[in-house]
Amino acid sequence: MEYASPRSLDEAIGLLSQAGVDARPMAGGTDLLVQLRTGARRPELLVDLKQIPGLCGIDCGSQGFRIGAAVSGAEIGECLPLREAWPGVVEAAELIGSTQIQGRASLGGNLCNASPAADSVPALIAAGAVCTLIGPAGRREVPVDDIVRGPGETALGEAEIIVDFRLPRPQDGTGDAYQRMIPRTEMDIAIVGAGVSVRVAESGECLACRVALGAVAARPIRVDEAAAALMGRRPDSEALEELAARASAAADPIDDKRGTRAYRTRVAGVLARRAAEEALRRAGDRWAARSQSS
């Protein structure tokens, strides 16, 4: 196996496009190196993306945020403007592995590994994140919820890589949150994960909502039916219970050693409700902070 560390996107795409060469991109490598060790993957060429400027760094602009696909979870956790704007996304990124893994693991790698239980993906879907893809055919932008097609399978084309993730500046009254359940207290794969983002009017009426679930289907899913339970109404206990019921109804999990199908289905509703409650609390705090500043 050979190793390459390109310094530009063109060089990386060229390496990945070589005819007859089984080349594999590496953002953080925390999943890929395990797969190499177990023999699940045996590429001829590893293309390390960590040295490409466009894939590193976080830009905090007036219109939104750009997070390089190879930025580590540790860097994301230290970005205070991003944490303040999208705390649910940051919380989810910080749940990927241990402190040591946080120094390497990236959003791009977590997404492209295409695990149904990936922690960052439901939070990114709930936040409406869009990723930039570049390959031999050019550049395109794709919502995160359209990337994963099934376990280990993505919508990326041949020699195509994710360059960055884009998140908008949250509007007034916006809040997001991510909740998960794992068998152990830390460093385990989610039984269920739930990401929710909301936008509420100062009067308390819910103006927008996005709900996403992980580990309850072959890929992370956006549950518009659950989000609709809050839209256009005050998010009281009845509305939140309806959101929970719809989230459970959308779940189609498997039985495995981490949890039964019935248990996961029930937990999906519980976590969706908890994430919605936290997102609503944060949205209310934003309105309160604005009122105090004015």
Image (cartoon, grey):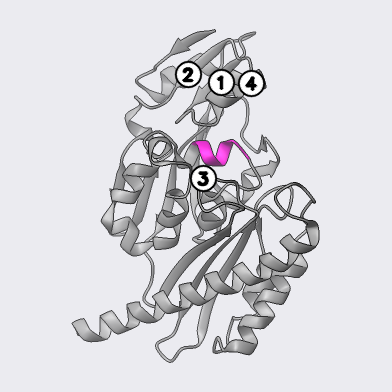
**Of the two numbered discs 3 and 4 in the rendering, the one whose residue sits closer to the viewer:** 3
Residue to which mark 2 is pinned: 47
Majority SS type along the magenta span: helix
Residue count near mark 4 (Cα–Cα under 10 Å), binned few <14, some 14–19, many ≥20: few
* Distance between mark 2 and mark 3 Cα atoms: 27 Å
Which residue shows up at 50% across the image and 73% down it?
198
User: Three-letter amino acid code at disc 1?
Assistant: Arg
* Distance between mark 1 and mark 4 Cα atoms: 16 Å
In the rendered structure, are the residues bearing label 4 and label 2 in contact, judged by CB atoms less than 8 Å apart?
no
Read off the magenta span: 109-114
Residue to which mark 3 is pinned: 187
Residue count near mark 3 (Cα–Cα under 10 Å), binned few <14, some 14–19, many ≥20: few
* Distance between mark 2 and mark 1 Cα atoms: 6 Å
Which residue shows up at 51% across the image and 16% down it?
46
Depth check, front residue: 34 or 211: 34
Residue 111 location (% of width, % of height): 55, 41
Quadrant of residue 75 within the rendered picture: top left
In the rendered structure, are the residues bearing label 2 and label 1 in contact, judged by CB atoms less than 8 Å apart?
yes
User: Three-letter amino acid code at disc 2?
Assistant: Val
Does 34 sit above or below residue 109?
above
